[in-house]
Image: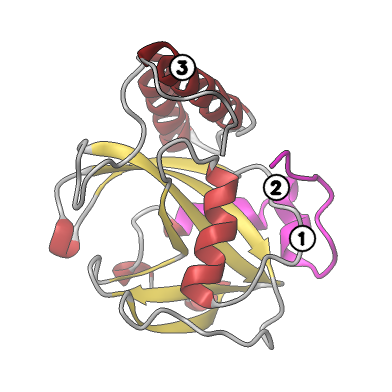
Amino acid sequence: MIDAPVGTSKSLSFLSNQMHDQIRAELELIEPFDAVEREHHADALSWVSSGAELFRLEKPATPPKHLVSYFAVVDEQHILLVDHRNAQLWLPAGGHVEPQEHPRTTVLRELKEELGFSCPHPVDPPIMVTCTLTVGLTAGHIDVSLWYVVRARREQPLHYDANEFLGVRWFPFAEVPLERADPHMGRFIAKLRSNSFGEWTSRGEPGQASPV
């Protein structure tokens, strides 16, 4: 969270501007992988630069375009997905970024809340961004999702949120059920397996520390 005086319109405007700057900086760390991501990346940057409200303020979808932190838990060539009750899809864990919360802080908070363990390493920059029209029980709004990676062992004990998820499961990359997953999951796995991010698919510590 950002530390700044609150209580006046000027201080609230300062907080908003500083948060927009931080989200823009996070987006600028992403190198788009393909034409689709270049389009989504440009859309997200334009949205942030417009000064629009970035955070969900009311459930289920106010404003109708808002920021989400996904985090894919990865161990070598395996990814942990959650069977999401509302979306009715296999998804990475994650959640809405709270007002004035840094998206990497969201990863730390949601990892503990949703899967029951703490991140074993500093949260690195996101590796992908998507702007997606939602489906399922709360369909019809746009999630601007920053995709992060958390590295953990498949032996890691999990205590998942049964109110949100029907279950959780480790999938080999080649066996992810893409027909019932986030529409960008195949592209995300391809990006993970690319030379640029090959370190995420072998055991060891990622190298870049988090600023939060």
Position in image of residue 186 (x %, y %): 46, 59
Real-space Cα distance between discs 3 and 2?
Answer: 29 Å
The residue pinned by badge 1 equals 121
Quick one: label 1, few (<14), some, or many (20+) residues within 10 Å? some
Quarter assignment of residue 26: top right
67, above or below 171, in the image: above
Side (left or right) of 33 relative to 97: right
Magenta region, residue range: 186-212
Q: Residue at x 75, y 56 (%)?
A: 198
Badge 1 marks a residue whose secondary structure is loop
Q: Residue at x 55, y 77 (%)?
A: 116
Amino acid type at mark 1: His
Position in image of residue 176 (x %, y %): 46, 74
Tell which circle, 3 or 2, labels the residue nearer the N-terminal end: 3
Q: Residue at x 49, y 78 (%)?
A: 175
Report the disc number at residue 124: 2
Real-space Cα distance between discs 2 and 1?
Answer: 9 Å
The mark closer to the camera, 3 or 2, is: 3
Report the disc number at residue 11: 3
Asked if the residue at tag 2 contacts the one at tag 3, i.e. Cβ–Cβ closer than 8 Å, the answer is no
Badge 3 marks a residue whose secondary structure is helix
Amino acid type at mark 2: Asp
Q: Nearer the viewer, residue 20 or 34?
A: 20
> Going by the picture, which residue comes out furthest to the front?
7
Tell which circle, 3 or 1, labels the residue nearer the N-terminal end: 3
> Going by the picture, which residue comes out furthest to the top?
10
Quick one: label 3, few (<14), some, or many (20+) residues within 10 Å? few
| Viewer can see residue 20 | yes
| Viewer can see residue 189 | no
Asked if the residue at tag 1 contacts the one at tag 2, i.e. Cβ–Cβ closer than 8 Å, the answer is yes
Real-space Cα distance between discs 3 and 1?
Answer: 33 Å
